[in-house]
Image: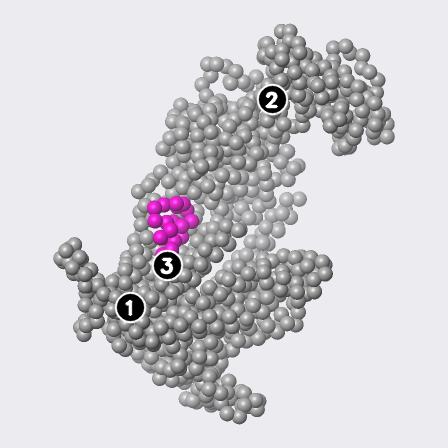
Amino acid sequence: MAKKPIGPVRRAFAPWEDPSAIPFIEFRNVTKRFGDFVAVDNLSLSIYEREFHALLGGSGCGKTTMMRMLAGFETPTEGQIFLDGQDLAGIPPYRRPVNMMFQSYALFPHMTVEANIAFGLKQDGMPAAEISSRVQEMLRLVKLEQFAKRKPHQLSGGQRQRVALARSLAKRPKVLLLDEPMAALDKKLREETQLELMTLQEDLRMTFLIVTHDQEEAMTVADRISVMDRGHIRQVATPGEIYEMPNSRFVAEFIGDINLFHGKVTQKQSEDAQLYCDLTDSTINIQGAGDVRVGDEVTFAIRPEKVRISLDKPAESNANVIQAEVWDIAYMGDVSIYHIKLAEDEFIRSVVANTTRLVERPITWDDKIWLSWDRDAGVILTN
Amino acid sequence: MEHRKPSWFNITSLVLGFSFLYLPIVILVIYSFNASRLVTVWGGFSTKWYVSLLSNEQMLDAAWVTLRIGVTSATLATVLGTIAAMVLARQGRFFGRTLFSGMIYAPLVMPEVILGLSLLLLFVSLDQARGFWTIMIAHTTFAMCYVAVVVQSRLAGFDRSLEEAAMDLGCPPVKTFFTITLPQILPGVAAGWMLAFTLSLDDLVIASFTTGPGATTLPMKIYSQVRLGVTPEINAICTILVAIVTVGVITASLISKRQQVQRERDERMAIANQY
Amino acid sequence: MDREVSSQSYSKNRLGRWALIMVPYAWLLLFFLAPFVIVFKISLSEVVVAIPPYKPVIDWAQGLAGFVEAAQQWSLDNYIWLTEDAIYLNAYLSSLQIAFIATVITLLVGYPIAYGMARAPKAWQPTLLMLIILPFWTSFLIRVYAWIGILKNEGLLNQFLMMLGIIDDPLVILNTNAAVYIGIVYSYLPFMVLPLYSSLEKMDSSLIEAAEDLGCPPMQAFWKVTIPLSLPGIIAGCFLVFIPAVGEFVIPDLLGGSETLMIGKTLWVEFFSNRDWPVASAVAVVLLLILVIPIVLFQRQQEKQKEAQ
């Protein structure tokens, strides 16, 4: 199958699809153990120049350890890390051309905003005039010119976050590492900052590596996401691919909401397959099933927003259509989630955008309704 | 335990408790201004004991020796104790760590007579002439443990990512300690110095064991006089010592209180300015 | 996330790391640990009339042979001596007893104070805390000395009591064990109050409200909720008073009388008056052995506390 770009295409930037592209950052079979605990398990990952890459996972998945190994705060137990062709082994953190923005911001409390931003430049022995012009440039970049003389505790949380960003960008590092950079901000500020960060990365044409547990954040900012779990990378792909074509049950369930059904492949013809689910006694037609064979036990996954519901039987013949009953409705404001009973203990969720006012909505509890979804709306997970 | 109002029982126990703690010292201070030689009979207000103290050369000598020992041992103990605290807080596991932390904590509860005796026997077997330097070393040894504990508690509350941030920005470890860590733990280091200094100023037992000819400290002098009986002159010198320490501690706590208030005000302003 | 486990990170520079560790380590080895070895060694030697007043047990000049020869001369005579003369055994026992009783009294005096502090308005608490710590900064010797003037026969306490007409003849307090108890309680009170206060202050007042809400009368709530929850503070405070009180010298010397037997004083007398260094060393070794038990228990307790947090 020809690989179609999935999801919104921000720009034609996809060096990972080019087999001749040289990785900018490369983790090669890296393992990190803390005593008996394996934080990172024989893991390889390539990140390309000017990429905005996100390491996404729950706590303890090893994402922070990966970043700290790149920064030099941890030494890999096994394996190598390359940056721009150079093996980083043995290079202490203070000699690495990467800079990090810390989760706690780690602003030096006894120094002014200016002095904080200038700190890294001074370590390089940059001439004073140059330092001051670079500091001004950074302050402009994060819109904090009038706060130059303030101490960190005289700033709000959002301002501190921008100082931390300016400080880590001031040295123009080869890679900017962002450790949960927005964890301490409230939701609204976080969304604004995510957009600012994306713009900044595009303008500066730098490589960014972000560590986050927030899937929405990763989806918003990153070119590619590595979904991590217990020291392993489960999938590396663009946000669109991760969402629409998860390669495993773990990834499918980790990102967003998803309906899962167990079934057996009963027919297979080129890319089309038919699945029989015995729990619901229904047949599902799938387009783009990948390499499954007749008789395989598989999981079928479909996102709730791809499941349509209607009172009348839909006319399209190409879709999967099942009759069922509304069990429960969760009203979320912008959308409503319909819990639809397919069989005893078998439910499917359907998300419907509330395009009309509540009173005018025709479907309600216990209604017999028709479910339908396109043949290419779901995905088959083999493992 | 907020919300609840203190009961009469609570207030009474606080009043009685603090009276018990402070009354003896207050009485001592009052009687240092007693004109009568008899310590227990009030003979009118007088500062003559302070005047006679100023002409008591032995006392002044002892005070001078004590001060010199205090300053040198407190300074040395602060340096060693701060390094020890850094080792305990930052170096993780190393060979002999248990022994090391044991040696840091043991002197805090070890009877002074044992510390004094053992150090004396060390100096004797090293054939070391005893005096100023031996007392200084003895005081440094036990005071550094107190400093290490005080500084370590300060380091425990210190955001380690500050050090990592400095290194990440290109600052080597030793420089990081002086530019980032030290300014942050300075209040703890200062408190450690003050503690080491007062411990040295206060010590009778260890100094008595490790002293030699010509090195009589103030507590030793006070002790030998006290054994002969209570005198207003001793009351006067005690009052001076208490006054110095009280002024020192209160000043230090007022300064830190003011800084904290200023800081809180700044933080409120920062939040207010946001909108 | 993984930060706790990553203690020994980026220390590439092993030499610098060891140099840093070795500075305080060497100091403590030389001036803390080595002296104990010497004390132990001397406790095995014989007393002689000389300077220093003991027979060196090891002649380092003879090397290993000298050591072996000396080791054959080591004797437990000093320790046997300690068991033969009842004064030592009595001094150890009475030290433990005095320290124990004084610790209990300090707890009884300290608990209401700590409880009152924890109940006081939040705004007062730092001041109260400083008032508790302040005496710790002032000279120990002076604070003990201050009690002499109060407790002696014609002292202020007796004057005061006689003025009130409570007593007709002065009470004999100074130079008795009662004065020693007062001295220990007074000197070590801050060590008791501080851990008690910090465990009481952390306590959530809604716990007591919950107990009362469930039908527990206040007094019972105190016994069943407050006391058990402040137990770590009680234990820490008691150890902090008991351990140093056992070896106390200044208090029994200045406030106690001839009947007051405490091992710190015995050691002092043995050393300064009798000039019997080997026996003084043996007294110190045994005292240390006695104190090792509570010290180890205390450190265990502290570590458990740290882990619980």
Most foreground residue, A110 or B242: B242
Which residue is denoted by mark 2 in the rendering? A246
Disc 1 chain ID:
C
Query: Going by the picture, which residue comes out furthest to the bottom?
Result: C168
Magenta segment includes A333: no
> In the displayed structure, would residue A196 be above or below residue C110?
above
Most foreground residue, B188 or A204: B188
Query: Mark 3 against mark 2, which lies toward the viewer?
Result: 2
The quarter holding residue C137 reads bottom left
Which residue is denoted by mark 3 in the rendering? B144
Magenta segment includes B97: yes
In the image, is C216 to the left or to the right of B76? Answer: right
> In the displayed structure, would residue A13 be above or below residue A119?
above
Same chain for mark 1 and mark 3? The answer is: no
Q: Principal SS element in the magenta part?
A: helix
Which residue is denoted by mark 1 in the rendering? C79
